[in-house]
Image (tube, rainbow, N blue to C red):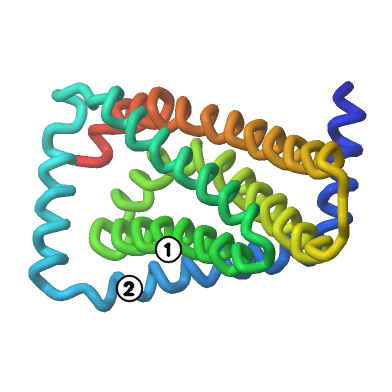
Amino acid sequence: MKNGIKSTLIRHISDNWVLYIIVLFAFIVGIAAGSFSVGAMDETQRSELIDTINNFFVILGTTPMDTSAIFKQSLLNNGEMALLSWVFGLIAIIGVPLIFLLIVMRGFVIGFTVGFMVKEFAYRGLLFVTLSMLPSNIISIPVSMAMAVVSTRYSIYLWKNRQNIMDKAQRRQQFLIYTVIVLILFGALFIATLIETFIAPALVSLFSDALK
């Protein structure tokens, strides 16, 4: 079974390597834009954000994190990513730039967060983003890219076959396959949500003294 899954993944990437490169490029553009936007912040915004993070570092280790709030926000973010990717994939060709925009925005958030934390808090910021963001993003980033590729491919498929008269059974089959794949990928994002909710806060609390 493992060999079957592995060969399927390899074949999928091999068949869609051009789309993966485009999606990766969109993600990198988002990261770069997020990093550059750190320098565009005005002093008031910068000071307020620094104060908020400093206050968080002060109470770190003494006040338990609200895992319920973290879970809800993470699930909302990943759920929106999956739902919008699925919906945009249903829009023949027009949905493609919207799918890429989702990836750019995801990269923007990561680029801004990492850029700001490292710039303003140096090694403490780097340690914090490593502990809080890296564990879940190891899963969520490649899964989000795969979801974007699957949605883009389905959108292009709809466009190419817009004039073909397919029977209802064939259309339903293609739609169900697409939907099931997106649901499976969302399942992987749900695992990332659990990591962000329980493992990341535990790691941050474990190294709380180094972050103060």
Looking at the image, residue 182 sits to the left or right of residue 154; the answer is left
Residue drawn at the location 38% of the way across and 27% of the way down = 197
Residue drawn at the location 83% of the way across and 65% of the way down = 163
Residue 111 in which image quadrant = bottom left
Q: Is residue 16 above or below residue 65?
A: below
Question: What residue is pinned by disc 1?
Answer: 108
Q: In which quarter of the image is the C terminus?
A: top left
- Depth check: 203 or 32 in front? 32
Q: Which amino acid does label 1 sit on?
A: Phe
Q: In this view, does 43 lie above or below 154?
A: below
Residue 37 - label: 2
Q: Quadrant of the N terminus?
A: top right
Badge 2, how many Cα within 10 Å: few under 14, some, many 20+?
Answer: some
Looking at the image, residue 61 sits to the left or right of residue 83; the answer is left
Residue drawn at the location 16% of the way across and 57% of the way down = 49
Looking at the image, residue 65 sits to the left or right of residue 199; the answer is left
Q: Name which of mark 1 and mark 2 comes first in the sequence.
A: 2
| Residue 191 percent across, percent down from the top left | 54, 28
Residue 88 in which image quadrant = bottom right
**Distance of label 1 from label 2 (alpha carbons):** 9 Å
Q: Are marks 1 and 2 in contact (CB under 8 Å)?
A: yes
| Residue 144 percent across, percent down from the top left | 59, 48
| Residue 97 percent across, percent down from the top left | 58, 69
* SS under mark 2: helix
| Residue 52 percent across, percent down from the top left | 13, 49
Q: Which amino acid does label 2 sit on?
A: Ser
Q: Is residue 50 above or below residue 60?
A: below
Badge 1, how many Cα within 10 Å: few under 14, some, many 20+?
Answer: many
Residue 204 - label: none
